[in-house]
Image: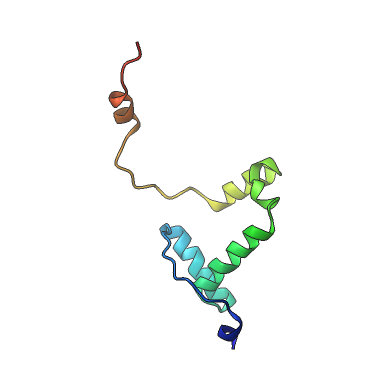
Amino acid sequence: MIAMYMARMIRKQVYLGAAQERRLKQIAARRGVTEAAVIREAIERLGEAPAARRGAAADPLAFARRLLAAGPLPPQARDWTRDAIHQRREPRG
């Protein structure tokens, strides 16, 4: 009875990209646990390993290799362009 030992749970909504959702489902299925359990474990691991969170600063080459292995980032939905931002800027005087 895991629920007996668990603290009161608070429901959260998170936004994931499509690739993140696929990865979360894969991890949960492979481990035979819920997606929520995977997210909770990830949060716990981040809290326990502050040195690992330094990423590029701790080991730049390893960080670059992880980025390359992860593949391209999904396109982000945005309602602005670089040119539009520059056009809205006030002229320097």
Name which quarter of the figure residue 90 lies in.
top left
Above or below 76: residue 19: below
Residue 58: x and y, percent?
71, 44
Above or below 69: residue 32: below
Residue 3: x and y, percent?
56, 84
Residue 29: x and y, percent?
53, 75
Left-right relation of 59 to 1: right
Residue visible at 64% across and 50% down in the picture: 53
Above or below 33: residue 24: above
Left-right relation of 41 to 10: right
Colouring of the image: rainbow
Residue visible at 65% across and 42% down in the picture: 56
Q: On the rendered image, what quadrant is the C terminus found in?
A: top left
Residue visible at 43% across and 62% down in the picture: 14
Residue visible at 60% across and 68% down in the picture: 41
Q: Residue furthest front?
A: 8
Q: On the rendered image, what quadrant is the N terminus found in?
A: bottom right
